[in-house]
Image: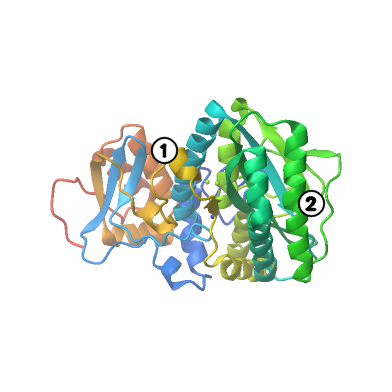
Amino acid sequence: MTSVSAEHLSGKDRSPVLVSSDKRGVRHELRPKLQQITTSETFNACGRPISGVNGVTIVNGPKGSGFGGLRSCGKGWICPCCAGKVGAHRADEISQVVAHQLGTGSVAMVTMTMRHTAGQRLHDLWTGLSAAWKAATNGRRWRTEREMYGCDGYVRAVEITHGKNGWHVHVHALLMFSGDVSENILESFSDAMFDRWTSKLVSLGFAAPLRRFAEPLPNSDGLDVRKGGLDVRKIGSEDDQVLASYLTKIASGVGMEVGSGDGKSGRHGNRAPWEIAVDAVGGDPQALELWREFEFGSMGRRAIAWSRGLRARAGLGVELTDAQIVEQEESAPVMVAIIPARSWMMIRNCAPYVFGEILGLVEAGATWENLRDHLHYRLPAADVRPPIISIRK
């Protein structure tokens, strides 16, 4: 799962095909443009008024403003709007798990990569990576090592970028330990995982990944990633929020290094999926081909994976699917206004960046009259109505 970052789409990095500098405006602006090139019928219906409703409600609640009465696809890998919701939910969950674990034990982040070439397809690489992770975290040796070193489990995400050497697919996982774990133990534990990871990749016909180098490579999130196929480092309490955000930047689409897919920008000349998406809707034929390959390759893939029992130990409930997350309703929302269905589609087709402006105005205390005036300034033919009257489509 990944969502779109206003930061990397604003200023000098922003494509001219996008107008908004607000992250919600970017998501709403990018969604209909991607729907013009998508191969997914489910995604193509996302963001349209539900049949039979009079209009789209504008609501404000404890977690912010939003829209109601819309179809949703729950495809966090390819839908920027759903990715934002999924990423925020996953980030909260990961933060809770990390905070709980640091209160009783310790946490480490492990990164495992695979070697690749420009000619390899994303689907094949991703399938190989999934098989390698399963081999690294299953079997008698894994169970013995977990018990020996006190590993309570893991939460895992997948990061995808594309560069001159093709698709780059790798895993980031937070390992939970019941007690304080030393650097030597971390190295031994992760080396054993990496041995199984490497053996599986080689058995599937992939080149053996290099283990590790010493040179650190700082990235924009304040964490350093070391060259090589394996990296592991211990996490302190001060890294809690950074790590949760980092993971969700990759895993929600938006997102969202382990759960907001939010549109994390690729490093070292590589492009993240949302950057490819922006280039694709901007008319880049190579980016269009890559985006369609990403749509196919991400189909049915889990953004976040939890080891058995970890969520329960941290007090989390049953894991929701991406579709269930986006269908959740805000508790005790206040309806501020209604946008008639025809006006909604007019905004969506002509000026979708306005949706981000509307949400920002609502959170600043705007009334329905304020929203009407703003919308008439942007699109004179569109309308906003008060929430207390019945309207026609």
The answer to whether residue 261 is seen in the rendering is no
| Residue 183 screen position, x and y as percent | 75, 32
User: Is disc 1 in contact with disc 2, using a CB cutoff of under 8 Å?
Assistant: no
Q: Amino acid at mark 1?
A: Gly
Q: Amino acid at mark 2?
A: Gly
Q: Nearer the viewer, residue 279 or 150?
A: 150
The answer to whether residue 330 is seen in the rendering is yes
Residue drawn 69% across the image and 50% down it: 266
| Residue 14 screen position, x and y as percent | 62, 49
Residue drawn 44% across the image and 72% down it: 41
Say left or right for 172 vs 251.
Answer: right
The residue that label 1 is drawn on is 315
Please tell me whether residue 19 is drawn above or below residue 393 in the rendered image.
Answer: above
Q: Nearer the viewer, residue 334 or 380?
A: 334
| Residue 29 screen position, x and y as percent | 48, 55
The colour scheme applied to this rendered structure is: rainbow
Say left or right for 234 vs 262.
Answer: right
**Quarter of the image containing the C terminus?**
bottom left
Q: Nearer the viewer, mark 1 or mark 2?
A: 1
| Residue 55 screen position, x and y as percent | 24, 57
**Of helix, strand and loop, which one carries label 2?**
loop
The 10 Å Cα crowd at callout 2, few under 14, some 14 to 19, many 20 or more, is: some
**Of helix, strand and loop, which one carries label 1?**
loop
Quarter holding residue 303: bottom right
The residue that label 2 is drawn on is 229
Say left or right for 93 vs 48.
Answer: right
